[in-house]
Image (cartoon, rainbow, N blue to C red):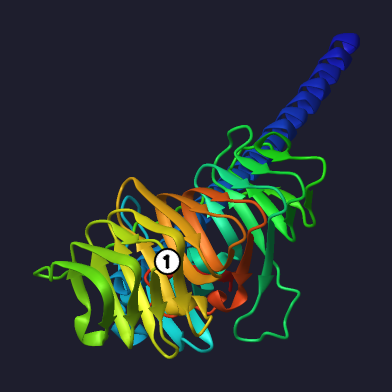
Amino acid sequence: MYAYRLKLKRNNKNHGAVLAIMVMLILLLSLTSLALIRVGQEARIRTVRNIAETRARFAADAGVERAIYQMNKMLDYGVFGIYGTPTYVSEALTGCDADYTVSYTGDSGSGYEITSVGHSGNATKTVRVTVALTSPMAEGYAVLAKDDLEMKNKSMVSGYNSSDPSETDVPVAIGTLSTKSGSIDIKNGAVVKGDVYVGVGGDPDTVINLKNTSSIEGETFVMPMTYDLPSVTAPFYLASHGKISGKNISLDSWDSGKYTGIDISNNGKLEIDGDVTLYVTGDITLKNNSTLKVKNGSSLTLYFDGDIEAKNGSEISNEAAIPSQLKLYGTGSHQNIELKNNSDIHAVIYAPNANMVVHNKVDAYGSFIVDDFELKNSGDVYYDKALKEVSIYDETAYFTVTHWEEL
């Protein structure tokens, strides 16, 4: 009997110990569950916060992109002014619960700043960018071709500054948007005193055909991103004045307008006296020993749909020797530019759909952006650093980001 009672007491003690352990396990599991629930809640809160911050950042970036788009559209319309640029306050971002507010500061001298504040829930992200004017001619290319670029024997590419003749060490480049083998062909004795670029995804060793006695004094690069060459729209004129033709012709600013062609006779002269803008829907021909002269203090902006041919002994003369005062914009789809100039040419030629040939011993100063480019024997091309100074009135000007920061 005593032994049975002792055994019962022992069993009661064991049951009590098991109960205590079970209570402790339940308590431990409860605390663990509460901790896991809290971790889960905190993770969810962080996820919600991260999503909100991501949306706010996307909204801020979208505000910047829209602002730059509007600034460039105003440039296209020729009515740019920072105070006339649309502002946005709590503008909803399509597709998500976020909005942005955009403001502008600055001027053409010091540069423009865009501040975009994105909001989503309790999250706010602020992005500030500095934008500046640029153009394809301001990018440092003496020659930029969409397809083939050929430099014949003993030709050269270098740089200078028409605004400061004492500056001789000017960075310069040539390039192609193509990735095709041999798109850039640099013949014997030809020299590039700068860098050479090939299209996105291209191999410089394949795209550039460099002969043994030719040289590239800079580096070879692959363009970091696709380079777009925007089309140019000629000015709108209601009526055409017909064709400019004859032997001795002088045009001033009152003669600006639309013409069906230009044809200057042998030994003839077309003289530009004043600031003249011409839109030529047909071909432009300078016959043997004829001259197109832009007088000192004058300028010519020429839009052309057809071809340009300057025949033997002809001359395209820019008396001021400042390339920005003679601008030629190709507005056709398949064009040819052939220069057999009797003297140096100082000009800007932007004709992304044109094949351009510069004949023997002609020095070309400025910037030349075309489809195909061929520089004949002993000809030289010099990029003008002064073209980096871009005006809102330049035909191919556009705003680009020069500095970005998140505040």
Q: Quadrant of residue 194?
A: bottom right
Residue at the extreme left: 239
**Mark 1 lies on residue:** 289
At which x and y percent is residue 99? 36, 64
Secondary structure at numbered mark 1: loop
Please name the amino acid that badge 1 sits on. Answer: Asn
In the displayed structure, would residue 328 be above or below residue 112?
above
At which x and y percent is residue 25? 72, 31
**Position of the N terminus by quadrant:** top right
Q: Nearer the viewer, residue 1 or 310?
A: 310
Asked whether, in this view, residue 158 is left or right of residue 45, the answer is right
* Residue 35 visible, this angle: yes
Asked whether, in this view, residue 223 is left or right of residue 74, the answer is right
Q: Nearer the viewer, residue 291 or 23?
A: 291
At which x and y percent is residue 306? 29, 54
**Residue found 76% across the figure and 31% down from its top:** 20
Q: Nearer the viewer, residue 169 or 318?
A: 318
In the displayed structure, would residue 110 be above or below residue 239?
below
